[in-house]
Image: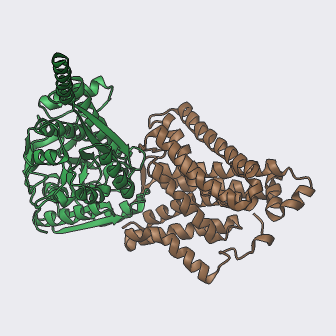
Amino acid sequence: MSWLGNLLTALATGCIYSIMAVGVVLIYRTSRVLAFHVGEVGMLAAYAMVTIWTPKAGPLQTIEAILAGCAVALLAGIVMYILVERLGGRFGHFIGTVVTIAATIALNGLMSLIWGGQTYRLPLFPGAISVAGANLPLQNIAVIGISFMTLTSIGILMRYSALGIDMQAIACNLPLSRLHGIPVQTTLCAAWVFGSMLAALAGVLIASVSVVSIEGSFIGISAIVAALIGGMTSIGFAIVGAFLLAACETLVTMFGEPRFTPVIPVICLLILLIVRPTGLAGRSENISRV
Amino acid sequence: MNKTCGIIAAAILCASISGADAETIKLGYLTDTSGPTQDISKPSLEGFNLYIDRLNKAGGVNGRKIEIDVRDTGIDTARAVATAQEMIAAGSIAIIGLPLSTVQAGVYAAMERNSVPVVAGYPSNIGLVLPPAKANAYATGIVFDLAGYIGGELARDAAPKGKTFVCTSFESPGGIVSCKGAIAAAKAKGFEKAESVMFPIPTRDFRAIAERIVSLKPDVVLLVLGRSRLIAMTPALAAAGYEGAAISMEAGTGDDAVREVAKAAPKIDMWSYTRFVSQGYGEGPQVTALANAAKAAGIKEWIQVHSGGWALGMLMEDVIKRCASPCTSEKFQQALNNTKLDMGGLTGAPIQFSKDDHYGPTTYMLVHYDRAKDAMVPLKGWRNYSSTLPKF
């Protein structure tokens, strides 16, 4: 058993959960809506990509495929913003969450209709390298690298860009942000689009290490649990939650009984509710920032 | 007056005779065209429809047309049972299709109360059809208990000097009994170590599972996965460094998927074993007929699931031929109980049902992926297996 291989697998899984969990936190903190549809957006983007991309694809075709994935994410973000904020906003945040649940059903149906439930491979990073006798798949290394760059960029964007600061302001106090002249609707739309983009990236990455399939959207649940473990108030703690969840899942699969992995998120949540009900961040919502 | 009455009476008699000639046999076909197993269910229905369309175009069975009432039930048992009841109320004399074991038990039980026969098609069936069979339960696909045991035996052919055998599947009733049977057979065939690695149904990321399998150092791995999971698992095994033999149980997987994963895992020696033939091997009049029909329908590559669907169509024609008009559920079941139908090359044995055995003897073929030819090549032809489940 290669401990290095297992470590990389757990890290790569944690990275993928992190990206999607950050998207969930971004949407929640700005719109107060729990985005249940992120897994489906991820798989939709992966399906769009695999429709264009083939293992023998050249650079141009690869760029086209990436653009297709981005277009799907952009569209999903804008449509969800319109549905939740513009049309459903007056009904409250709970209805917004219900809209995202409805979106999961609709997106599942859409994928079924277009791709007929087919499963496709998306081997973006084939091959492996051997280190100290251990076989290390390149896909895990690539996923870790891409995730590190993405999460670092998000951190910089949130802290130093005008858009990031506007998002933080809205997360802290929406009415006050409006009084200060922050373009609230534009910023909210950007948050939904960012959330969708991150979901799409995570969807494509999980598809590249497994397959593109409708059931792959199950990853959304893991991301939501990771965000909940983090407390829903902090990007940093959502990432910690994601790695904690991935580590537990990998450990149980490798050294325990793989059949019990679906209950790991539930157990993690239960322990958290008992020990630290406000999540790892331990901050109540009204004084916290994105 | 008498003349007029005579003409009217003659007209009524003629009408009733022509009505009898034009009798339509209605069958209810339950399937999944929207749920998670539609990639398996659709080709099965496609193969069935190809046969029935051809039959109806040629005038039906002794002038009787077959009307198929196809309904999508996903893999929801409650929906499948309710839909089956509706179909019976609407005039279907039997329920067929049900290509996945998940909903079969519920439908068999519900239809037993209505005294309606249920014939489950390819790929997967449950053991209720094996002797002593449940009264109204029939099947033409693979019974997992039996197929798993056969897989364990065939593992010896894939790894003649192998010492360690691993069976992997997802945690469904079919997967569990398959691996149980496979382990018993592998031990009987001389494997020193035989283990199973089961994983939850929602699993889509197989990297950690593959690492776990590789850590057991197997010489051969039996993959009871179905199509989508095979496509995900095999490359994960390769990425984890596995370089032994892998045998895929053909349960709706399709040779195209086996070839695809074999290319993605160049160091794995890829095998499959199957009850029905696929495009590229097998010969006989029905194989030719299916190939022609598939070509005319624009199907790029027909796979085992198409053969299974076509076989179900053949069975329906044969039973209706022997079902005297008006063909009721009771007469249909009587005809089913006396079935012996040559498959014309689609599989090695006839479909054979009796009063107590609603499955019959089956044949399986071990097929090897030839990298040079990029094709699946049969090994040693058909092997015979009885419907009596070995004790394990």
Q: Residue at x 75, y 58 (%)?
A: A30
Q: Which chain is brown?
A: A
The answer to whether one can see residue A246 in this image is: yes
Q: In screen coordinates, is A52 left or right of B143?
A: right
Q: In screen coordinates, is B144 left or right of A182?
A: left
Residue A173 vs residue B132, the one in the foreground: B132
The quadrant in which residue B53 appears is top left
Residue B21 vs residue B170, the one in the foreground: B21
The quadrant in which residue A277 appears is bottom right
Q: In screen coordinates, is B149 left or right of A152?
A: left
The answer to whether one can see residue B371 in this image is: no
Q: Position of residue B295 (x, y in %)?
A: 28, 25
Q: Residue at x 38, y 62 (%)?
A: B209
Q: Quadrant of the C terminus of chain B?
A: bottom left
Residue B26 vs residue A108, the one in the foreground: B26
Q: Which chain is green?
A: B
Above or below residue B303? Residue B221 is below
- Name the colouring of the figure: by chain
Q: Position of residue B58 (x, y in %)?
A: 20, 23
Above or below residue B15? Residue A12 is below
In the picture as drawn, the residue positioned furthest to the right comes out as A180
